[in-house]
Image (spheres, rainbow, N blue to C red):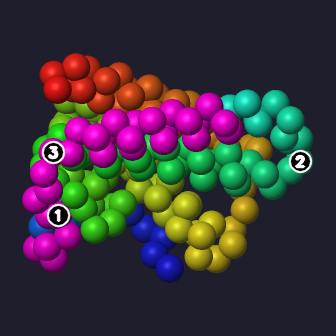
Amino acid sequence: MKTTIDDLQTTYKSCQTKGLLKEKTVDVELIRSLLSMAEKGLSFITRSIPAIPKESEDWTFVFREHYESLRSLIEAYVRFDGIGADNHQCNNAHICQNHAELELDWNFLETIRLKRNAMNYTGQMMTHDEWKTMELSFKLHISLLTKEIREKLEGF
């Protein structure tokens, strides 16, 4: 399993060359649905956090819900460009390459993508301390994208 982060330009060009970025219609209902799912997932997990002991491996699921919510928000934002990607990495590369004004952190997005893959494909778990190192970056990215998507939806 891959554990290193390639630079943004190399990854974006690879996604283009391999045909992993595809033209899609701007489906406003899909964008709204992705936003709603992200918000509902975050609301659920946020209510659950106070009951999770620091020693628990349930922080894995806190991470995974934040990851899925952020992934959905990225997909929703990319859909405004009329683009859909075949994988999370190419969605991340597209948004970082084409929307530098958002100042999303490519290294953070790749780090969490690789961490999520390790969880899903090798059963890796997460500790409270690991979660705390990522929590603020998750919140910043999620907050920014939620705001930007809501603003874009006002135009439809």
Residue type beneath disc 1: Leu
Check disc 1 and report its element: helix, strand or loop.
Answer: strand
Closest to the observer, 134 or 25: 25
Q: Give whichever of discs 1 and 3 has the lower sequence position.
A: 1
Foreground mark, 1 or 3?
A: 3
Residue found 81% across the figure and 55% down from its top:
57
Q: Is residue 32 shown above or below 147?
A: below
Binning the other alpha carbons within 10 Å of mark 2 as few (below 14), some (14 to 19) or many (20 upward) gives few
Residue 61 belongs to the span the image colors magenta? no
In the rendered view, does 51 fall on the left or right side of 92? right
Q: Which mark is residue 26?
A: 3
Residue found 52% across the figure and 49% down from its top:
67
Instruction: Kindly identify which residue carries mark 1.
Output: 21
In the rendered view, does 126 fall on the left or right side of 144? right
Instruction: Kindly identify which residue carries mark 2.
Output: 55
Residue type beneath disc 2: Glu
